[in-house]
Every structure is written in C-alpha cells, then in structure tokens.
Amino acid sequence: TSRRAAPALAGEEDEEEEEDEACSRIFFEPCLYHCLENCGSVTLAVACQQGLGANQTFYVDFRTEDGSAKAGSDYEYSEGTLIFKPGETRKELAIGIIDDDIFEEDEHFFVRLLNLRVGDAEGMFEADCDDHPKGKLVAPLVATVTILDDDHAGIFGFRE
C-alpha cells in the first residue's frame, strides 16, 4: 500500500503547485521605508505577481496604523483601495509626512494591506473560491515607515 500512496501524494503536490502558480500574490515590495521629517510625503510600492493565465482585477485596501509616530502629528492618516487591472504588476501609494520644529527621536508607523477582492477583467466582482483562490495577500502585508528627525536639539554656548 505504501507504493500506491506515494504516487497519489506526488500527484497532489503537483496539483497544489499548479494551483499555486495560478494564484496571484499581492504584497509590499520593499517593506521598509525611511524618510526625513521634512520630505513632504513617502511613496510605498505594492507588487502583484500575476498568476499563470491570470485575467482578473484585484482590489486591495490599505490603511496607516500608529507605531511610535502618531497620525495627525507625525504623518497623515490614510486609507484607500489599490486596483490592479489584468497585467498590472506594481502600484504606488503616497503618505503625507508632517514636519515640525520639535527635536524628537526617529519614529515609525505602519501601512497594512487588507481585504483583497477579485473581479473579472472588466472589474465586476466575482466569488473567489477558498480552495483555489485567484489571488491572495502574502507577506509582507505590513510596511514600516521610519521618519528620521531632521530637527537639531540646539546648541548652548557660554561666555567666558
């Protein structure tokens, strides 16, 4: 019986690999970003590795989340939806960075990908089967943005 089981397992693995190759993957590339506090905004890139024979439109939401940097004082809260049409492999999103004159440590915040939806080539939503998904979010789903402080602590001088 062990001889019969081996071919079945090998066949199942091949089938899983084929399904895996047909599944598109969406993720941050890269997932670490650095910017100066006075840069105005930082641009993040999201990649879509299209699966074999993929002809779908993918909708993926993003939103910022506080780390040591806080929305409204260090960066501008942002959320939205990126749309990957058939054949598109990269999208960018910009997050506003708030400059101040306060000396502080470098701070960071996060941007998260979530809620992937699948549409046909024309963008009409369609059901995505859990057993054989047409697309999935894969790591890294979260990008980290480090804001490098550009304010000086100040210099004290004494007269002799």
Image (cartoon, helix red, strand yellow):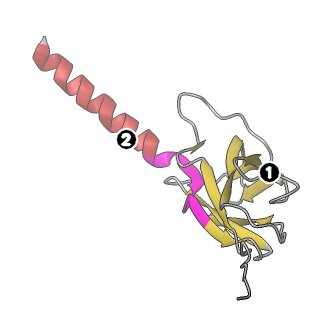
**Position above or below: 61 against 29:** above
Q: Position of residue 48 (x, y in %)?
A: 59, 58
Q: Secondary structure at mark 2?
A: helix
CA distance separating discs 2 and 1: 42 Å
Residue occupying the point 58% across, 53% down:
27
Residue corresponding to mark 1: 70
Residue occupying the point 65% across, 59% down:
145
Report whether 29 appears left or right of 44: left
Mark number for residue 109? Answer: none
Quadrant of the snapshot with the C terminus: bottom right
Quick check: is 145 in the magenta stretch?
no
Identity, as a three-letter code, of the amino acid under mark 1: Lys
Local packing at callout 2 (Cα closer than 10 Å; few below 14, some 14-19, many 20+) is few
Mark number for residue 17? Answer: 2
Specify the segment rendered in magenta.
21-33
In the image, 108 versus 2, the foreground residue is 108
Residue occupying the point 59% across, 28% down:
130
